[in-house]
Image (cartoon, rainbow, N blue to C red):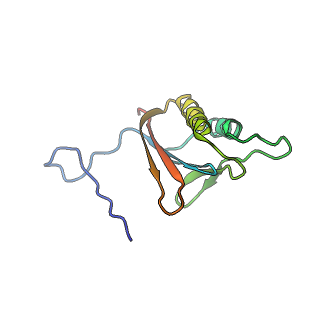
Amino acid sequence: SKATVSVLNWACPCVRTPPPCTMPHLVVNCTFNPPVIKMMGSTLREETVHKLDQRLPIVTTTSVSPKKELPKFSYVQNPPHWHNDLGQHFCDQLGRSMIFLTMIECLEGEDWKLKGTNTVTHPDNGKDTTKFFFFREG
């Protein structure tokens, strides 16, 4: 089945085209388990991605093997987004909260502000995805 997306224009009803976007936006998807994180929208500083690379794997519920290289974000061209699959890790509810807190702290360091969040459970596989919506004033 195909999903239908409706776009609401909050501008004056007499205006037929939406106003230009004045604030950059960022959407972060966190799917569990195993944790898979995708960040899409405005560009991120390389130092922020590097900080997330270092901090996210160590806050999962499972321990990190000192012999294995930590998973890192990679940039995917189509659609353009950052992707990190922490496939060897697991997160219980506390681990998920730690992933969320770490991600929010790192992004707030780049002046992103959390606007909203939403979680859905996928009926086909039982995984859940939490979406975080950030904005940065232009």
Query: Where does residue 122 sit, x and y in percent of width and height?
Result: 48, 57
Q: How many marks?
A: 0
Q: Is residue 42 shown left or right of residue 49?
A: left
Picture quarter containing residue 19?
top left
Picture quarter containing residue 53?
top right
Q: Is residue 3 shown left or right of residue 36?
A: left
The reply to whether residue 41 is in sight is no
Query: Where does residue 59 sit, x and y in percent of width and height?
Result: 67, 36
Instruction: Determine the residue located farthest toward the right in the rendered image.
Output: 67
Picture quarter containing residue 61?
top right
Q: Quadrant of the N terminus?
A: bottom left
Q: Is residue 117 shown left or right of residue 6?
A: right
Q: Quadrant of the C terminus?
A: top left
Residue at x 29%, y 54% (from the top left corner): 7
Residue at x 29%, y 57% (from the top left corner): 6
- State the residue in front, 105 or 34: 34
The reply to whether residue 120 is in sight is yes
Q: Is residue 56 above or below residue 18?
A: above
- State the residue in front, 35 or 46: 35
- State the residue in front, 31 or 7: 31
Residue at x 26%, y 49% (from the top left corner): 18
Query: Where does residue 88 sit, x and y in percent of width and height?
Result: 72, 51
Instruction: Determine the residue located farthest toward the left in the rendered image.
Output: 14
Residue at x 36%, y 39% (from the top left corner): 22
